[in-house]
Image: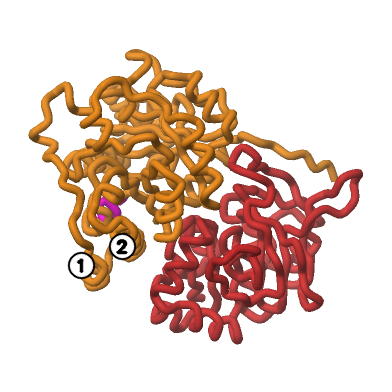
Chain colours: A orange, B red
Amino acid sequence: MEQEQQVGTVALKRGLAQMLKGGVIMDVVTAEQARIAEDAGAVAVMALERVPADIRVHGGVARMSDPEVILAIMDAVSIPVMAKCRIGHFVEAQILEALGVDYVDESEVLTPADEEHHVDKHAYKIPFVCGCRNLGEALRRIGEGAAMIRTKGEAGTGDVVEAVRHARSVLGDVRRLITMADAEVMAFAKEIQAPYELVKETKALGRLPVVNFAAGGIATPADAALMMQLGVDGVFVGSGIFKSGDPARRAKAIVEATTHFRDARLLAEVSRNLGEPMVGRSAASLSETEMLAGRGW
Amino acid sequence: MDLGVLALQGDFAEHAHALRRLGHNPVEVRLPRDLEGLAGLIIPGGESTTIGKLAVKYGLMQPLRVFAQTRPIWGTCAGAIFLSQDARRPQPLLGLMDITVARNAFGRQVDSFETDLDVPALAEVEAKTARGNGQPGPRPFHGIFIRAPLIERAGPGVEVLARLPGPGGGQGPIVAARQGRLLATAFHPELAADDRFHRLFVSLARGEV
């Protein structure tokens, strides 16, 4: 029997995201934090130099992290390690692939490098996750090769309202699409500016063709369960853990809430005594230029 | 038949779909009480550390070991690690199968791969149960290996079901094994459009093989 191995396939890229479902992906800035996240039951970590809340405070241009930071985190844990590149910065993506990270997040949290084009993600062996605010944006990213989608929310705020808005928009549009007559699909694709074939595929599947997590503002176990009940496949928690009073405890509680997201009695139990949550900033108080979710095209 | 899928974390929905395609009722298991009345259990792919920690926290370790005394359990990838006796690092394991696994044995995601596997036991189960609806005769099973483990050691009571090809056409590492009613695969049949491993598991639950 001929036994050839295929690598970097769509099935492998989308498949890794399927293994992360029902889990929590945590932002970490040091190997020590990565170990705390793994001990708490994170399914993956996002290796960063600064969490989004600090990127907001710091200002200036936010770029891919120093490879030294990423490599230290890759050495520290056995779970998958993700890292962010700037929107459209295909060389940062090449570098992350060369480092051997498990997933690249082409992220609006960093300062965009291209105000028109995203990275051509088909060209890489490693998978990409991208943010979206609506179904059209999600399907454009999948069209470019994203193997996983996350709703953007508003990173670094600790305010879940934007994550809810974006999840409701994506999932609501999928529900609308499912009930449409076939003849209406082309006009819908035009309206949401999405590739027609992917719109048809979404309609046939009754869901996005890739795994869809929530991100941007999740700070409590209740926030994580809220997003899960809305219908996402898992959650990213950025600043919400390591900007809180007791990161290890809060991290565990959010992991447990993501598994038992429909069990209100267990949610009450895991929400007890978690110490101070991150201080946060209401998304409504942000000026237009401070909103990160508008980045991406 | 009511068949459980451990739903602590991972791709349990894909296993549930496969079981439904075969006409069975998949039941999501998150707490010990969910195991009641099930004829078998699948432990899905996912992160074995996450699944193990949640199983310990919610009191599933002992109930799962008792479950395995009378009913089949099948672990895919993370599930296979969780069934093993030894994963060569400290993490919660059920220790039900006399196997040692190496986690992320092939490397990181960039080293994940797909390949066809020769699995003679699948042809046997199709012949025995006469329920196969695929083409007759031996045909390969498409293995999807994602940050996959491999089975480094299999004890005397463990039947090897599949190996990767070794260098120079020799025998490579073990990627599927069976010990009585316990089944471990390092790859993901739930992601392949091929239900033969799920049918093997159903046959185990029925006590046919």
Residue B203 in percent (x, y) is at 65, 73
| Residue pointed to by mark 1 | A273
| Residue pointed to by mark 2 | A249
Q: Pointers 2 and 1 in contact (CB under 8 A)?
A: yes
Residue A268 in percent (x, y) is at 21, 69
Using residue A283 as the reference point, say whether residue B25 is left or right of it.
right
> Could you say which quadrant of the image residue A11 lies in?
top right
Q: Main secondary structure of the magenta part?
A: helix
For the C terminus of chain A, which image quadrant? top left
The amino acid marked with disc number 2 is Arg
Q: How crowded is the residue under tag 2: few (<14 C-alpha within 10 Å), some, or many (20+)?
A: some
Residue A221 lies within the magenta run: no
> Could you say which quadrant of the image residue A52 lies in?
top left
Residue at 59 percent of width and 28 percent of height: A98
Residue at 33 percent of width and 26 percent of height: A110
* Label disc, if present, on residue B129 of the rendered structure: none
What segment is highlighted magenta in the picture?
A226-231
Using residue A144 as the reference point, say whether residue A256 is left or right of it.
left
Residue A160 in percent (x, y) is at 19, 45
Residue placed most toward the observer, A163 or B72? A163
The amino acid marked with disc number 1 is Asn
Residue placed most toward the observer, A37 or A7? A37
